[in-house]
Amino acid sequence: MAKYKIAWLPGDGVGNDVMEAARIVLDRMKFDAEYIHGDIGWEFWRHEGEPLPGRTIDMMKKTDCALFGAITSKPKEEAHEELDDNLKDKGYIYFSPIVRLRQEFNLHTNLRPCKAYPGNPLNFKEGIDLVIFRENTEGMYGGVEFHPIPKKVFDVIAEHNAKMKKFSEYGLENLAMSTRIMSRQKCANIVTQAFEYAKKHGYKSVTVVDKPNVLRETGGLMVRTAREVARKYAGIDLWETNIDAQTMWLLKNPFDYGVMVAENMFGDILSDLAAQLVGGLGFASSGNIGDNYAVFEPTHGSAPKYAGQYRVNPMAMLLTVKLMLDWLGENNDAGRLEKAIAKVNKDNKVKTYDLGGKNTSLEVAEEVARQL
């Protein structure tokens, strides 16, 4: 019997390509796991009206964690048009399966390391080593949205905030609203995760990034809560920055920052910028981590035009595998894998098109496997 059960979720597009690359490395490591395929992605939306079927969630609950490839998501109207004809009038509404997974399994912490490996020609500067903690279940991605805004909802908000009333002149049928709901508990949790990581790995500061001068209630809650948490960690400074200024400072002074923490949307934006500093999304790994379960995924998209061509850089996925191994407590294997990845980067011989090479995703994975 295998030591671990891993939910295997290729998803869409190049998700399948990079998952094949991951399997090459895992098999070479003789990682003791059973990989259980799960249905997820655009084809299941089109043919079933559900991109994350219930059978997949049921399967995942019997596994230790999940490895996920990539997902295709489209705006509501486009998603509806791609449904099979017999499903179009059934009331199905598309909702991102990865967002649903984060909420279904309470994967509150999104961990996104961004490390510049020597030899990578796309590094902004060698030596960058950032980790971004992103609150993963609330904020702008909480899924509480309206279009049009129901009159009852409008009236309740207008009763408590006069600023809402001015929008009535446009007609409720012409209004759309996305909410940014944040709780003190989840703010405290994500900031605590960031400080614990800083403490464990020797970072001297944690930077909380938001926009409290404009988003006074939600941003204010995040910053006030961060200050409360910071009092428990003597010797680790809390820095506070606005998201717009932080994008400039991160580009200008990337070595000033080690651990950063933000709510859902701002964390998403910040981590893509940080990824570009170390070679782009081809090197951007992430873990969606909860108390008892985790889903690991590269942060690049499904890139449908490249599907099945094995062109995309698999390093993001291989670094994601490294995160999964660490989370499972297989630190020796995680260290071996990172050293192999670093060696292939340093040699700069076997590489995909984004790095100026001509090798396939699978050839890069095979080279990493040889270095193991």
Image (cartoon, grey):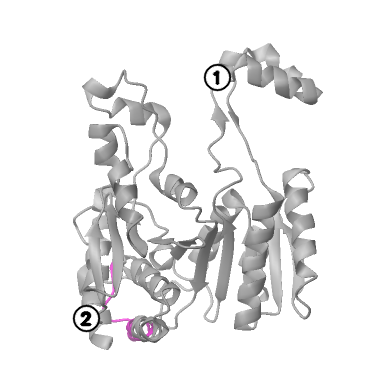
Q: Which residue is drawn at 62% across and 67% down?
A: 193
Mark 1: amino acid:
Pro
Whether the magenta-drawn stretch holds residue 345 is answered as yes
Vertical relation: 78 (above or below) 346: above
Mark seen at residue 148: 1
The answer to whether residue 146 is visible is yes
The answer to whether residue 359 is visible is no
Whether the magenta-drawn stretch holds residue 235 is answered as no
**Element carrying mark 2:** helix
**Element carrying mark 1:** loop
Looking at the rendering, the stretch of residues picked out in magenta corresponds to 342-352
Mark seen at residue 28: 2
Quarter assignment of residue 367: bottom left
Question: Residue 364 location, x and y as percent?
Answer: 25, 74
Give the number of marks.
Answer: 2
Horizontal arrangement in the rendering, residue 11 relative to residue 214 (left or right): left
Mark 2: amino acid:
Arg
Name the image quarter holding the N terminus.
bottom left
Q: How far apart are marks 2 and 1 (CA)?
A: 53 Å
